[in-house]
Image (cartoon, rainbow, N blue to C red):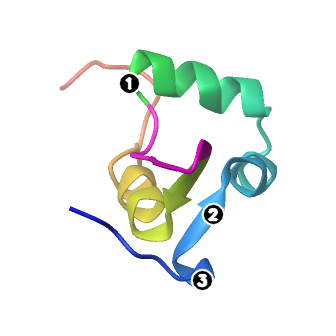
Amino acid sequence: MTIILSKDEYMTECALAEMWGVKRNTLQKWRSAGVGPKFLKRVGRIVYRKQDIAEFEQNNIFQRTTSDKR
């Protein structure tokens, strides 16, 4: 299955790192660990679909830092 995205539908690794204020290396580590947003490899380049970034952010909204579920 081929996914065709226009430039306004995805972000580069550099753009996402800048937007989130993290280093590219952090995104690379997340990809290896499988903990970051979904990504695509396009001709050897990593890109992130904006819809996957939004989904990842939505799934990582918390009200407290502890895991205590009272």
Q: In the rendered structure, which amino acid carries the disc numbered 1?
A: Gly
Q: Quadrant of the N terminus?
A: bottom left
| In the displayed structure image, the side of residue 55 where residue 1 appears, left or right | left
Q: For the view shown, which residue lies furthest in the front direction? A: 43
Q: Main secondary structure of the magenta part?
A: loop
Structural crowding at the residue carrying mark 3, measured as other residues with C-alpha within 10 Å and reported as few (<14), some (14–19) or many (≥20) = few
Q: Which residue is mark 2?
A: 11
Q: Residue at x 51, y 78 (%)?
A: 9
Q: Residue at x 74, y 24 (%)?
A: 25
Indicate the secondary structure of the residue bearing disc 2.
strand
Residue nearer the viewer, 4 or 10: 4
Q: Which residue is mark 3?
A: 8
Q: Residue 17's x, y, as percent?
A: 74, 45
Structural crowding at the residue carrying mark 2, measured as other residues with C-alpha within 10 Å and reported as few (<14), some (14–19) or many (≥20) = some
Q: Which residue is mark 1?
A: 34
- Mark 1 or mark 3, which is nearer the start of the sequence? 3
Magenta residue span: 36-45
